[in-house]
Image: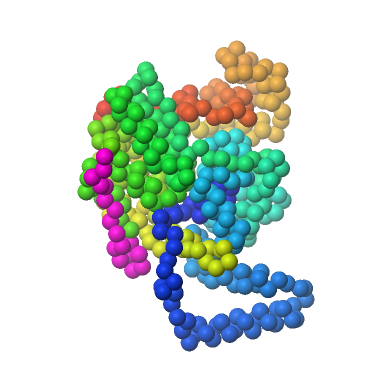
Amino acid sequence: MKNKERYIWISLVAILSCSLFQPIDRVKAISTEGEKYLQILHEVVGFIETDFVESVEEKNLYAGAIKGIVASLGDPHSRFMSEDEFKHLQEETRGSFGGVGLEVTHSEGSILVISPYDDTPAMKAGIQPQDRILEISGKSTEKMSIEDAVKLMRGPAGTNVTIKIKRKSTKDPFPLTLTRELIKIQYLKSAYLENEKVGYIRLSQFMGRENNTGGEFKRIVQEFAAKDALGIIIDLRSNPGGLLDLAIELSDIFLRPELDIVSVKGRGEKLVRVYKSQDNQGKVLDVPIVVLLNAGSASASEILAGALQDNRRAIIVGNQSFGKGSVQNIYNLPYKTGIALTIQKYYTPSGVSIHKKGITPDVVVNQITPDNDDKTLIEKLSKTTILQTFIKDNPGYTEKNIKAFQDLLNKKGYKMNKTISRFLLKKENAIGEKSPVYDREFDPQLNKAIEILLNPINPKPTSM
């Protein structure tokens, strides 16, 4: 969610408004000035069709003109969709499509990864939020549109696509070859930590109308509450957003009636609507909540987190979120095409716009990251087959193999932090396997969330 390739590419990190159609009487009559430029457009098309050095298809000229109109708005989240692109978007809202499993946007002249999706080729290959895609199948993305990037990354399941990645933590770009799969997103994963009496629920995207994501989410948190859970962790890390109405629906579960969830403002910052919590049945009001965020948490994720944070209903743990604070509406156009248009900006209950800023956690906790020396060693190691050969000869993530791998690295001159070497070994062993619901070994953010729930506090913003 999810043009959004991502590969799963949902309207470019966009929040989709629940109103998908607009009455035809809203179409504005063409002005005299507009008629002039329409005449110029037809003249230009005529000259191109008769005199341009190569033959062209008329439909491509007009499609290009429409895309140019939308691009002139200077808004990366507004876009025209061809029949195929519009069809793909509709498939994504249903949760089934093909590709590599990436959510991307266009930023600073290249394709920027918002997040990979769970259990997809992109996630298994280790692609991270904020990675920049410099090339796709050998083609530079410097002047590539999102639409063209999507076309290149999509393809039949079982086929390969090679992309070149630039990552902040590495000196040089590096290639990755991904095998495309038919992507069926499992939007929700959950588990109950019996020893800690803590419920954990991960939402990968605010989508899934046909899968009743909202109803299933509510059922899970109600089950946690019925078990007298000491708290519930809502994991929105690397969740790029999705449907506005779903973000409101999920926020409502945890809030007493008549509290602000989000407000939206239109042109000229005119207030359009304030969404408030309703007097609904089945709310979960007394169980403490912790929400996990990171740099890949965007739009609808930020609405839910902002609503719970501003209403003092949840503690936010992790890193600053992405900062996507605008709302897109999807309009049907003739001949099965469509347009996504930014129509509003949203504000948290405290009246703050998070656009280009993001949600600031109450408790900042960084994930485990290698230092500069380890980054250099990892990059050097990636250019060898040392890790792959070791796993082939010593399969399994066991303490015996961990020690043997660390001894091998030391012998070959890789003086690497032991935590980092363990992580590399575990990650490589897990390639091709289904991801666990959670893994506490290398997840200080999750561990801090559990600690907070087991030792209730009212934290001021702090860092770890």
Q: Is residue 391 above or below residue 294?
A: above
- Is 409 on the left or on the right of 220, as rendered? right
**Residues rendered magenta in the picture:** 265-281
Q: Quadrant of the C terminus?
A: top left
Can residue 334 be seen? yes
The quadrant holding residue 47 is bottom right
x, y percent for residue 285 = 25, 36
On the image, the x and y values in percent for residue 20 come to 44, 59
User: Measured along the vertical axis of the image, is residue 6 above or below residue 145?
Assistant: above
- How many numbered discs sit on the rendered protein? 0
Q: Position of residue 391 (x, y in %)?
A: 67, 21
Q: Residue at x 46, y 54 (%)?
A: 14
The residue sitting at 33% across, 58% down in the picture is 264
Which of the pair 331/295 is nearer the observer?
331
Q: Is residue 122 visible?
A: no
Q: Does 198 appear in magenta?
A: no
**Looking at the image, which residue is at 57% across and 70% down?**
66
Is 268 positioned to the left or the right of 294 in the image?
A: left
Question: Quadrant of residue 25 in the image?
Answer: bottom left
- Out of 252 and 216, give the one closest to the viewer: 216
